[in-house]
Image: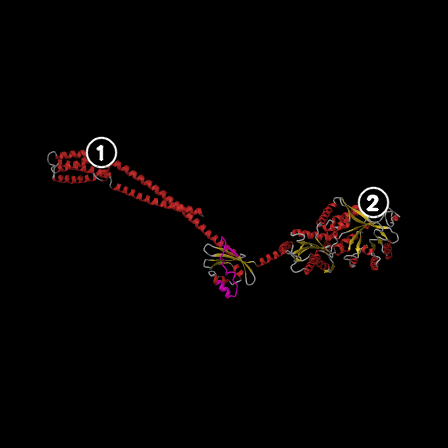
Amino acid sequence: MFLSRQVSRVLVLVVLLFAGAAILLAMRISERQEILSQASRYNLVWLVTQTTNEIARFGSEVGAYVAEPSPANRIAIGQRFEVLASRSPQVHSGDMKAYASVDSNRMALLKDLEAGIKEIESLITDIDAPGNAKRILEIIGDLNPRFVRLASAANNTTSERVEAERQELLTMHSWFTALAGGLVVSGLALMFIFRLQFRTLNQGLARLSLQNERFNAALNNMSQGLCMFDADQRLIISNRRMVEVLRVPEHVLAKGASLGEMVSRAEEASMDLSVLDTVPILTDSRGFAASLRQTSDGRSIAIAYQRVTDGGWVATYEDVTERKQHEERVAYLANHDTLTGLPNRARFQLDLNEALAESAITGRSIALLCLDLDRFKAINDTLGHHVGDLLLQEVAQRIMGVLRHGDTVARLGGDEFSIITRNMRVRQDAAHLAERIIEAVRAPYDLEGHRIIVETSIGIAVCPDDSVDGEQLLRQADFGLYRTKSDGRGSYRFFEAGMDNHIQARLMLETDLRKALAADEFELHFQPIVSLESTDEVRCYEALLRWKHPVRGMIPPGDFIPIAEEIGVIVPLGEWVIHEACRQAVAWNGTARVAVNLSPIQFKRGDVVGAVHQALTHSGLAPQRLELEITESVLMDDGGRTQEILTSLHKVGVRIAMDDFGTGYSSLSYLRKFSFDKIKIDRSFVKDIHIQQNRDIINAIVELGRSLGMTVTAEGIETAEQLELLRGAGCHEGQGYLFSRPRPSYEFEGLLFAPDSMRRVARPLVPLHVS
């Protein structure tokens, strides 16, 4: 478009130049034509020729008079002389004078003509005088041939001049034709460009119209309301969204209305237009300002103003009520736990820093309590995450119920909670709070048909006694918590110097435990389970896991099994135990079974059926010789998955035993849900069997097992008295130190590889012998 404009301007200039040149050339052509016209009518040749003719005629008249003098001839001579005399001024002026002036002979001829005319004039008055006529004829005779030659030369000169003028006229005609052609071509080019520009202009108008349509579509489909005011605060333009955001009739925002008029119209309609009745005075260097206004109906309107150069402004109005609510919700979620509604770790850190700063100013102590739920993972794994979540919510409510005003509780993650108690007078205040929390948490819970009892362990650190640094204080409270768990759980401990060493030892144990299986540091010990029905025959050997640490030596199961369950190592470790027990048992003579304990975690996270099938296949052990012992807590998973697993194992011939019967979450309903092969009476009942109440419980369990067709085994038999009482109660099998401690299989060589008829034990089995 810019190039077309430039070309058009150049072409217009060229056309103007062509037109001016054509006009000038036309004038010159007209002049030349006039000159040629004059030359054709009266020219130098004509004048010289006429003069020559007049001289000749005058000579003829004088000759005729000399030959025959008469008055008539004399009159004729006079008339001819007057004509000839009249030629003299003509040849001495104009073109003839200019023609003669360039040649001395021509000037001499003209002078001679003038002198001859004067002389003849004096002679003609007395022409009859002797010799006058002759003299006249001599003068004429001299001038006549000379003028004939002059006429011939003038004719040549005039011809040349006419030819030159004609050629110049032809040249001018050629230039005029070229100019006319150029003018036509330039005019056509200019017309083409004008047409092109006209078409471009139409296209531009069409595009502008389309852009206007698009602009209107975009304007009316903006998520924000938009309006523009001029310097007099009158509305120039607004979109449909503006009406929706302000919730006013369309006539309120009439184009051309002033800001005050619009506000008045809204007030007349009992509508709120206060968000519009504000023009920012202070803007930034770019003329921009922003604000957030609240409407009378509680909505939040975000307003952005932009000054324009003419003194007006353009503004956008956006209803950000939902966004503000979302932001507030996000801000709440960023600082609170979604499950319990308690502050989360991020918010807790802010509250802790605030409490520490306050303590530094007031000098009052604060206590930080860290707690978690004992055995929560087992509850989560057996009853499911839904029940675990409900338990966490209930625990959070109970903790908040015992806190003082100003105390803060937060959920840091999982079953971990932390509490900040302010303005403590003595450390005993923190201890009293811990006791209240423990009592509140341990009260029974009824959740989804389950009655749950859970304990909590608490660690306490005090500022400024232990530390004034938040991270250090939290770490010290964690040390106290770990120490509580190590000492038996369900209690609290204040942080003490040296606790960190204990925790470091625990962490080192976890690290070593993760590497122990690959390092082949585990081994199985076996404890015989004997028949109490008069024979003392060994019917089964329970495989018990032992960890032979390369530095610390033999580590008791109670020190590492709970840790293995917590960190998840129990799944691969449990699978190894199944494989190793089957591998060793297949080499034994006879039909003695091998019993393996399963953790609830294996049912939740592992593939028990796959592991058992693989162990039996690889070892070649008959399924009937494998006995799996589970605790009652495994059956608390209402999803039915555990029962499906047990049923699958039972179908292939594997025996299932319920271990520690009568403790924990036991329920007789589980015995109806699944047909166990054996129930094992917990050692706590056997230990106090001399108490009548415990004997009654044992008798009831034995009778229950007999009625359900289940073998009843008593654990923890250590004295002959216990053995006799259990036999008297009708217990089928017994197990305990009275018969043998758990030992490696090679120490049972006399029993394991003897025929069934010789497999008997003597009490105590130290050293082991065959009876």
Q: Is residue 176 above or below residue 306?
A: above
Q: What percent of the width, then of the height, locates residue 280?
A: 50, 58
What whole-number distance in Å separates the C-alpha atoms at marks 1 and 2? 167 Å
Q: What percent of the width, then of the height, locates residue 231?
A: 45, 58
Q: What percent of the width, then of the height, locates residue 421?
A: 66, 57
Q: Residue at x 64, y 59 (%)?
A: 406
- The front one of 409 and 730 is 409
Location of mark 2 (residue): 746
User: Where is residue 81, by image quadrant?
Assistant: top left
**691 displayed left or right of 282:** right
**Magenta highlight range:** 261-290
**531 displayed left or right of 547:** right
Q: Residue at x 76, y 52 (%)?
A: 599
Q: Secondary structure at mark 2?
A: helix
Q: Secondary structure at mark 1?
A: helix
Q: Nearer the viewer, mark 1 or mark 2?
A: 2
Q: What percent of the width, then of the height, locates residue 161?
A: 28, 38
Q: Is residue 682 visible?
A: no
Q: Which numbered dot is residue 104?
A: 1
Question: Few, some or many C-alpha atoms within 10 Å of disc 1 (few <14, some 14-19, many ≥20)?
Answer: few
Q: Is residue 110 visible?
A: yes
